Amino acid sequence: MYGLGHLKRLGFVRHARELGFSVEAVRELLKLAERDQPCDDARGIASTHLVEVQEKIAALRTMERVLQSMVARCQTEHAPECPLIEALFEEHRAGTASALGGD
């Protein structure tokens, strides 16, 4: 039912989405594909997305370190309270205090 152009376009969308581009960015890239010399504009869209991906990776690495520490505490401490659960309460309290203007 679909022609080669449709399949190519669907493949483009699928691949762009797999790389994490937003629907809006995919639309912009598809519009650029129809222009002559779209590379500068496409590079700008991809560069912006790259920065977003790098920020997400940094945040995930931070989460990984915190979780590793919490799991390690849970394995080494044999207390009636779970250190991991207590740490989650501590982080929540600290975040709440900061949000409320406390230390």
Image (spheres, helix red, strand yellow):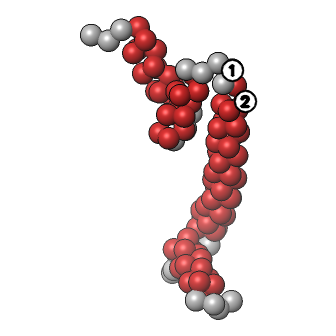
Give coordinates of residue 25: x percent, y percent. Answer: 54, 38
The residue sitting at 59% across, 80% down in the picture is 95
Give percent across and percent down for residue 90.
59, 81
Q: Establish if 71 lies above or below 19.
A: below
Residue situated in front as seen by the camera: 75 or 67: 67
Mark 1 residue type: Gln
Residue 80 seen in render: yes
Answer yes or no: do the residues labelled 2 and 1 have beta carbons within 8 Å? yes
Quick one: which residue is furthest to the left in this view?
1
Tell me which amino acid carries mark 2: Asp
Can you tell which quarter of the image residue 99 is in? bottom right
Residue 40: which disc?
A: 2
Residue that carries the numbered disc 1 in the rendered image: 37
Under circle 2, the secondary element is helix
Residue 17 rendering spot, x and y as whole percentages: 50, 33
Quarter of the image with the N terminus is top left
